[in-house]
Image (cartoon, grey):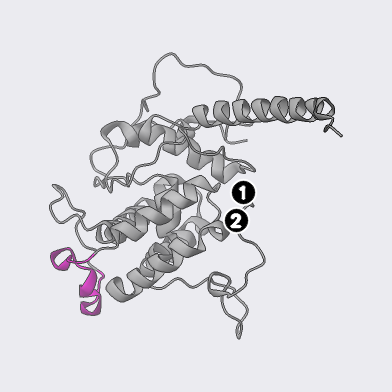
């Protein structure tokens, strides 16, 4: 008796569609995060560190191990001029 | 920080209009970003415990930024010391001067004796952290290698303050509950 392969087409379709969406989403997220998985559950400290990374390297997820910061880093912080609530 | 500000879109990068006066001694800021700093955090904490506590106590007295500038400079210089040693950069053009309060017993970390480093393990660990939302529990394997290397070469070990005594620390547990996200 022949296998009813046409009945499996919807499953294959679902798998392919969800897989394509998921892959595309993951690729889009990684493209905005310099090829790394996105950060999640960021609290105020982590947001401050991400902003510091942006001031140091130009990108939110850029990392560097330089012991001395680049030239404009010491005066690029907007923190000091924010009004304390 | 960014939660209570109104939307202020700047077309130029922000430059502080009131930089520090030249009477304040200049100390180079650390150029390490968040993941390398987090990786080295416990070693910096152990080596710089005294200066860090000085700074925190000073801040507890008075939140005015001008009050704790001196202690802040010491904190930056101490962290830069550990950091430079970890990376082994003997030919840096402007190394931070060693802290005057260092006892002779700390001479193993003096700039002139930088011979060893743990650059490979350090890089492996902070790159693993970057891929895992900077969670320590996801990167125990590189962390073990880094801790071993730093302990043998720099005599710094990671201890978590407030750990319950009598049990292995969470980074030394054989079968931890929290590990990396299942891929």
Quarter of the image with the N terminus of chain A is top right
Question: Who's the residue at 21% across and 54% down the image?
Answer: B96
Task: Tell which residue pokes out farthest to the bottom in this image.
Answer: B166
The chain that hosts pointer 2 is B
Label 1 belongs to which residue?
A: B183
Q: Secondary structure at mark 2?
A: loop
Tell me, yes or no, if residue B67 can be seen here. no
Q: Which of the two residues, B173 or B8, is positioned nearer the viewer here?
A: B173
The residue carrying pointer 2 sits among few (fewer than 14), some (14 to 19) or many (20 or more) residues within 10 Å by Cα, namely few
Instruction: Measuring from the top left, give residue B51's x and y in whole percent.
Output: 38, 64
Work out whether disc 1 and disc 2 sit on a shared chain. Answer: yes
Q: Nearer the viewer, residue A43 or A75?
A: A43
Dot 1 surroundings within 10 Å: few (below 14), some, or many (20 or more)?
few
Kindly identify the residue that appears in the image at 23 percent across and 39 percent down: B22
Residue B180, labelled with which disc? 2
**Residue B67 percent coordinates (x, y):** 41, 51
Q: Are marks 1 and 2 in contact (CB under 8 Å)?
A: yes
Chain part drawn in magenta: B101-116
Up the image or down, A35 lies above or below B126; here it is above
């Amino acid at each position: 008796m022949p296998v009813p392969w046409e009945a499996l087409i919807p499953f294959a379709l679902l798998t392919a569609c969800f897989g394509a969406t998921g892959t595309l989403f993951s690729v889009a997220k990684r493209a905005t995060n310099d090829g790394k998985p996105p950060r999640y559950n960021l609290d105020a400290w982590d947001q401050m560190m991400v902003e510091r990374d942006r001031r140091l390297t130009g990108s939110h997820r850029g990392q560097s191990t330089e012991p001395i910061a680049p030239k404009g880093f010491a005066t690029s912080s907007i923190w000091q001029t924010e009004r304390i609530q | 920080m960014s939660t209570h500000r109104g939307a202020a879109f700047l077309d130029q990068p922000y430059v502080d209009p009131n930089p520090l006066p030249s009477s304040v001694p200049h100390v180079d800021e650390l150029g390490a970003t968040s993941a390398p700093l987090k990786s080295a955090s416990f070693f910096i904490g152990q080596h710089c415990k005294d200066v860090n506590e000085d700074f925190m106590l000073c801040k507890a007295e008075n939140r005015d930024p001008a009050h704790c500038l001196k202690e802040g400079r010491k904190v930056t210089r101490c962290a830069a010391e550990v950091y430079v040693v970890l990376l082994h950069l003997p030919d840096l053009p402007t190394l931070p001067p060693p802290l005057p309060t260092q006892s002779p017993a700390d001479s193993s970390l003096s700039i002139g004796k930088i011979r060893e480093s743990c650059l490979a393990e350090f890089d492996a660990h902070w790159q693993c952290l970057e891929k895992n939302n900077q969670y320590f529990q996801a990167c125990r394997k590189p962390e073990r290698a880094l801790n071993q290397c730093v302990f043998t070469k720099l005599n710094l070990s990671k201890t978590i303050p407030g750990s319950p005594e009598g049990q292995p620390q969470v980074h030394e547990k054989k079968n931890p509950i929290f590990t990396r996200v299942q891929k």
